[in-house]
Amino acid sequence: MERLAGAFPRDPLILANRGMVLARAGGARDLADATVSAKRALTLNPRFAPAHTCLGIIASLEGRMDEAAGHFAEAVRPSDPAGYRNLGLLACERGYWDEAEPLLLHATRIDPLDARAWAGLGAVALRRENDKEAVLLLRHAAGLDPGDSRTTHGLAIALDREGDGAGAEEVIRETLAVSREPDRWVLLLDLAALLISKAGPGGNPVLDEEARQALEKAAALRPGDPGILFYRAVADARLGHPKEATEGFTSTLGNAKYRIPALENLRRLKARRRSRASFLPGLSAARTALALFSLLQLGALWMFFIAGLLTEAAFALLVAVLSGLFALALFGPARNGKTEDDTPLDLVIPPREFIPSPGAEMVSPLIRLRTALRP
């Protein structure tokens, strides 16, 4: 795009598409350059809808939601087919679900092949806990755009909520096999979350290790993402790496979604470490107290025997009794055949959500024809 923009510096379409490519990269410098490119396109054609769309996406990425809505509304005025869809997706991102649905329905009437609008309707159905409808809508969206990671992310969540975890894993792996877009990190995170869920509260070394490998790949595409850090900490904790797990949970405390689960998991990790570091680790508090009491009593008996306060027969009898109590505390079967330290480390894991948002996309050259024919 840089070469094209240099060759055609006064072409609004090329400038808008350059802005879209930079916005897709998402870095601070990229977004600044994308803004310059989109504004340059508007100076050449003030009614060029894709330039307004690009500025709206940039504003959305930077958290300026009201400004983003204004740009998307400007894109709607010259009848941009994506305008209503982007307004609907922005409403989803802001939590205005009731406002989002009519906008997205209007977008699908304008362009029945708009996969992202159908995916947005699937997100609305998920929010209303209508999982069956969400699966149908998201399957339709995925059929229109099979390689879109965000749509597959929503479909996997809908399938998992409907009870079809195997189907959710299948669609994720199928999309990962064909998708090469930067957003595939979302699918790797979804795959890890499914594997961790399949392993159960007690964990499964094979599934947890596979989940951790998927998260390593996701981290390479999206360094520092709090979701990746959180789930990697879960995998580390289950695989017996408490130090790495503690660091991972601590690094997500600044994120609103993961703060409370991370704090609770840190508390549980700390409690597990205390139980393992205590006297006679692996025993419950009552059994530990019984063992200590028996040892103290044995010591006291020895002192009484040396002082001549106990006969040999009484000393032997009491030693046998206290030794039996001590052995019972150490080696007796625990309830259900497990010691306290053998119980699974049940971690708090927040549910995965599908909240779509406007995304940068290349604009077709056919926009020229539509602009030329507009009265």
Image (cartoon, rainbow, N blue to C red):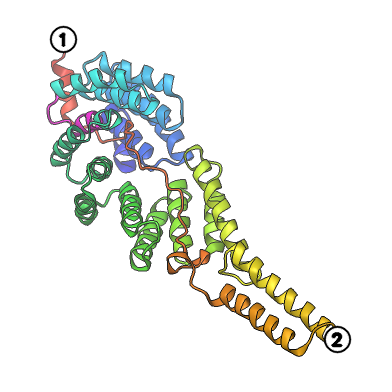
206 versus 371 height, above or below? below
Residue 33: which quarter of the image? top left
Instruction: State the SS at label 1.
Output: loop
Q: Residues within 10 Å of mark 1 (few under 14, many from 20)?
A: few
171 or 15, nearer to the observer: 171
231 versus 375 height, above or below? below
> Residue under circle 1?
375
Q: If the image is split into quadrants, where does the C terminus sit?
A: top left
Q: Main secondary structure of the magenta part?
A: helix
Image x and y of residue 302, in percent: 79, 83
118 inside magenta stretch: yes
Q: Amino acid at mark 1?
A: Pro
Image x and y of residue 221, in percent: 39, 53
204 versus 198 height, above or below? below
Q: Amino acid at mark 2?
A: Gly
Q: Can residue 364 be seen in the rendering of this structure?
A: no
Q: Can residue 279 be seen in the rendering of this structure?
A: yes
135 or 58, nearer to the observer: 135
Image x and y of residue 94, in percent: 39, 25
Rounded to the nearest angstrom, the CA distance separating label 2 from label 1 is: 117 Å
Identify the residue shown where x is 34% and y is 68%: 206
Instruction: State the SS at label 2.
Output: loop
Q: Residue furthest right?
A: 307
Identify the residue shown where x is 18% and y is 38%: 135
Q: Residue furthest bottom?
A: 312
Q: Which residues are magenta?
A: 111-122
178 or 291, nearer to the observer: 291
> Residue under circle 2?
308
